[in-house]
Image: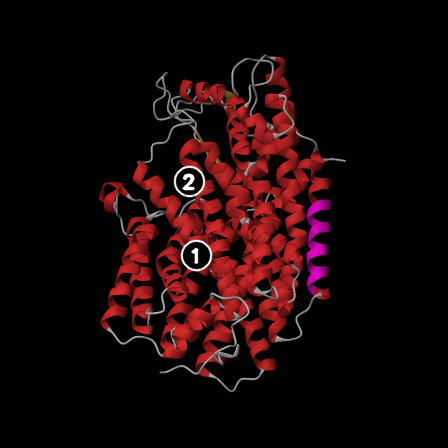
Amino acid sequence: MDQMFWTYFFVGTTFALYIGIAVWAKAGSTDDFYVAGHDVHPTVNGMATAADWMSAASFLSMAGLIAFLGYGGSVYLMGWTGGYVLLALLLAPFLREFGKFTVPDFVGDRYYSTFARVIAVVCALFVSFTYIAGQMKGVGVAFSGFLGVDFNVGILIGMFIVFVYAVLGGMKGITYTQVAQYCVLIFAYTVPAIFMSMIITGNPIPQLGFIGNAAGTDVSMLEKLNQTVTDLGFLEYTQSNKSMIDIFAITGALMFGTAGLPHVIIRFFTVSSAQAARVSAGWALVFIALLYTTAPAVGAFARLNFIDSVNDATYIAETGPDYSTKAAELTAAGQKPVPQWYKDWEPTGLLKFEDKNGDGIMQYRGPNSPDGIENEVNPNRDIFVLANPQIAQLPGWVIGLVVAGGLAAALSTAAGLLMVISSAVSHDLCRRTFFPDMDDKTELRVARFAAAGAVCAAGLLGIYASQLGFVAQVVAFAFGLAAASLFPIIFLGIFWKRMNKEGAIVSMLVGLISTFGYIYFFKFGGGSPEQYLFGVSPEGIGFVFMFLSIIVGVVVSLMTAPPPQDIQDLVEDIRVPGTRQSHGVADAGMAPAE
């Protein structure tokens, strides 16, 4: 059985499973659609949270960035890991104690303001649509890779799959679908890592192989990789060309952005209590660690394999049987033909070879090329987790499993983000703001229509996301927006009773507008790195503007009237599990003061 059979087998089987779960867990009420009835077991929720968290950025792009940026790519690993710990310990239990459906729900009631709720909806939509653009780009990479179709066609196929199970099942269907997706993606990530670790280091445990010696030598794997990349004119793998302040800022933006991400926070509303939220957070950390501790090894192995496979290979323009014939002739003549995996990925447009010197040889070089040869090979870094098994010539079933895992990672997070978007429109804007007399049945219908519309918008964003950068970089923008706009008002709303509606509104607006404006200027407005504020790139600027947002919010709050006493009592209550109702504040929320 060949690679294509196994790819179709694993992808077809897993998709049938996801859709079957969505049908089985079809939401019958708004409670089911938004928060899965508040009765998800903590362990199950931990696994679903891990799948929600480990998006296309984690599965597809993070290892690719680490592979090509080396130490500089570790900011994504550090930021996302630390951010989840921050969210789990600092915010999630208290938000669950508050008992709301959504983050804008918390903002609207905590800050006793309809206008604050609307601004929170705008922030959530900005963050979610930016994030989902990266996910749909990952879906396009995965589908285009295994089907051999254009990237944009791959996105359209992914849109249809997400539409079926997200719109039908709501959060209840998504929760149990994400459990299945976690199982698929973690096996898909670790199995090829074990194979590659055995081949390159002789150690079956990737985490140990990463810090061990290369197979059959006394040289460490990282030393070998450093020597390999520097010989080709690249910076040492264990060094970075990013400034220390930029590394710190990107890590901070990812950490604090995690604590403000609506689609992650909403997962903790699906369990029965604040205690259950803490337990599920602990399980989620365990499940996440399985992938995150493996990612550095996958990135390092990918870089070595890619260089060995492509550098100084003779390019063959032909495909199919003609390629096989020409490759055999070159091999017999003692030459190195372009590998089959490269020809498989070439139709996607995600690999490019430009024969600058006309010799037909694929020279892969860095900016400091010692032989003066220009680089001729430009790979998209998002493909490397998917392409790794082919590059390493692993069995066909491993390749098919990885494709299914990549799709599971991208689709699981895309579905969670769609829930945030649909609930923001149907619950926070329609029912809680503009149409307070709306019944549950109508709200559920609006939520499904909103999710369907969001799928279409997400697909278009995914198509244009390639203009912003790699999947992880696009996602980093979403984290920066969340760090600057949502984290400050959630954090201050829980831990500072004096924070009022005026401070919250100004804080969100300052954080959102400043961060979005900075990203837009440097990605679309012609800004150059020499103009970076304090040397901080767009990926990390949300961390800087987060402090500006906090300061502005505090100053405005101190200059205006304090919150009503019942709001201050509410803040006290949500920090003490079990006392949520002691001051007469019902879960249905309070009437806004405006």
What is the three-letter code of the residue carrying label 2?
Val
User: What percent of the width, then of the height, locates residue 526?
Assistant: 26, 48
Extreme-bottom residue of the structure: 437
87 in magenta = no
Q: Main secondary structure of the magenta part?
A: helix
Q: Depth check: 374 or 426 in front?
A: 426
- Which quadrant is home to the C terminus? bottom left
Q: Which mark is residue 75?
A: 2
What is the three-letter code of the residue carrying label 1?
Thr
Q: Which mark is residue 130?
A: 1
10 Å neighbourhood of mark 1: few (<14), some, or many (≥20)? many
Q: Is label 1 in a helix, a strand or a loop?
A: helix
Q: Which residues are magenta?
A: 9-22
Q: Is residue 583 above or below residue 107?
A: below
Q: Is label 2 in a helix, a strand or a loop?
A: helix
Q: Depth check: 403 or 90 in front?
A: 90
Q: Is residue 365 above or below residue 523?
A: above
Among the two numbered marks 2 and 1 on one chain, the one whose residue lies closer to the N terminus: 2
The total of numbered circles placed on residues is 2
Q: Is residue 406 left or right of residue 514?
A: right
User: What percent of the width, then of the height, locates residue 466?
Assistant: 44, 48
Q: Is residue 437 above or below residue 426?
A: below
Display colour scheme: secondary structure
User: What percent of the width, then of the height, locates residue 409?
Assistant: 58, 49
Residue depicted at 66% across the width and 35% down the height: 191
Q: Is residue 549 left or right of residue 583?
A: left
User: Is residue 170 visible to the viewer in this orientation of the structure?
Assistant: no
10 Å neighbourhood of mark 2: few (<14), some, or many (≥20)? many
Q: Depth check: 578 or 133 in front?
A: 578
The Cα atoms of the two marked residues, 2 and 1, are separated by 19 Å
10 in magenta = yes
